[in-house]
Image (tube, rainbow, N blue to C red):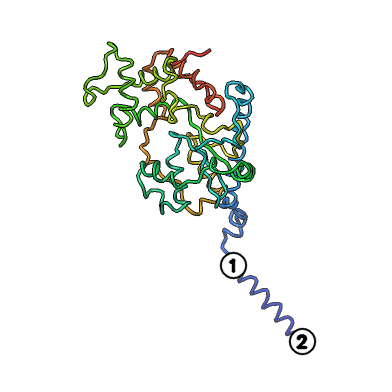
Amino acid sequence: MKIKGDFLGIIITSVVMVFLFWRSVPRSTVNSTKSVIPKAKSITVNEKQRNFLTRMRNIQYGRKQTIKEACRKYKNDIGEVDVFKKPPWNIAVNDEYRFIYCFTPKVASTSWKRILLVLNGFMNDTGDQPQYVVNRAGMSSFHYLDERSPKDIKYILDSYTKFMFTRNPFSRVLSAFRNKLAPDTNYSQSDVWRKKLGYYISTLYNKNNEPVVDKDTSYDLTFKDFVRFLIDENQTNHKHWENIHWGYQYDRCRPCEIKYDIIGNFETLQDDSKYIMKITGTSDVTSFPSSNGSNPTNSSSKTSLQSYFSGLPLEYVRSLYERFKIDFEMFGYKRPTLNIPYK
């Protein structure tokens, strides 16, 4: 009988404990399924990175296909260069991180040069030196593809990450004018540019065809005359007609012969640079610099383009497009429609 009584006591005690526990559970937990269903996990950093890399790979595939089509279409106009014997001089090589970069002026080249100078130890930070040092003394510390033997060049082109950047040709032309030649530019070397080209254009298209006498006070070069110079068939032999700051981008980097892994666009500079730095492993060493040290002109904005191009004669704009037509098509820029009634 004692065993039976003890067993009954255990059962009663258990029932009481279960009851007390049930009373202690919050009603929201008992009555609501919302609080007991796990919330969807927020996307992790790795997932974000994977999505970003996937998106960028898809973008790059499209850009490279566009280049391939343009190379085939304009084969006779572009010509062919043996890049193993004579590669473009403006391709910098970084052996430590195994990449090459083809730099083109007015396409964020100063920003990328700053990164290269940090990687090779010339600077400790991307903001250490002013623009003229980066583009003069700094560049002398680069290693260039054209310094290598054909055998080494082939190895590098086959195994290193290769990238270049492009820009809408119209905004690049405008940026070159506003930065180098406009009367109101604050560029530190503007006097040099006036002497080597600005005064020449001003005199060339002077209404009375008279030379500029007082160069200190009468410099009034207009964007219209600058564009007129660029489309003037009588000026094609002038040494600055194809200046590197506005010359053909396809000829600078030869993407028909060099199969670049990444084609960056100035218009998507931040994402493309982030992608390149991730692929090359350089994002752990430095970061992409701001544009403060490179005299930005904001020439890619719709407002700036509208302001300057709307004042040009229609035939000037059409001729300028025809001159840079291959760049437009090869790098995926739409045929301009700004005040241009193309059919």
What's the residue type where badge 2 is placed? Ile
Identify the secondary structure beneath mark 1: helix
Return the disc, 1 or 2, that comes first in the chain's sequence.
2
The reply, left or right, for residue 252 in relation to residue 184 is right
- Occupied quadrant, residue 258: top right
Q: Is residue 58 above or below residue 174?
A: below
Picture residue at 45% right of the left edge, 25% below the top: 242
Measured Cα–Cα span from mark 1 to mark 2: 31 Å
Picture residue at 23% right of the left edge, 22% below the top: 218
Counting from the top left corner in percent of width and height, residue 94 is at 53, 48
Decide which of 66, 36 is in the foreground and name it: 66
Residue that mark 1 sits on:
23
Residue that mark 2 sits on:
3
Decide which of 177, 253 is in the foreground and name it: 253
Q: Is residue 167 above or below residue 29?
A: above
Q: Is residue 27 above or below residue 130?
A: below
The reply, left or right, for residue 226 in relation to residue 1 is left
Q: Residues within 10 Å of mark 2 (few under 14, many from 20)?
A: few
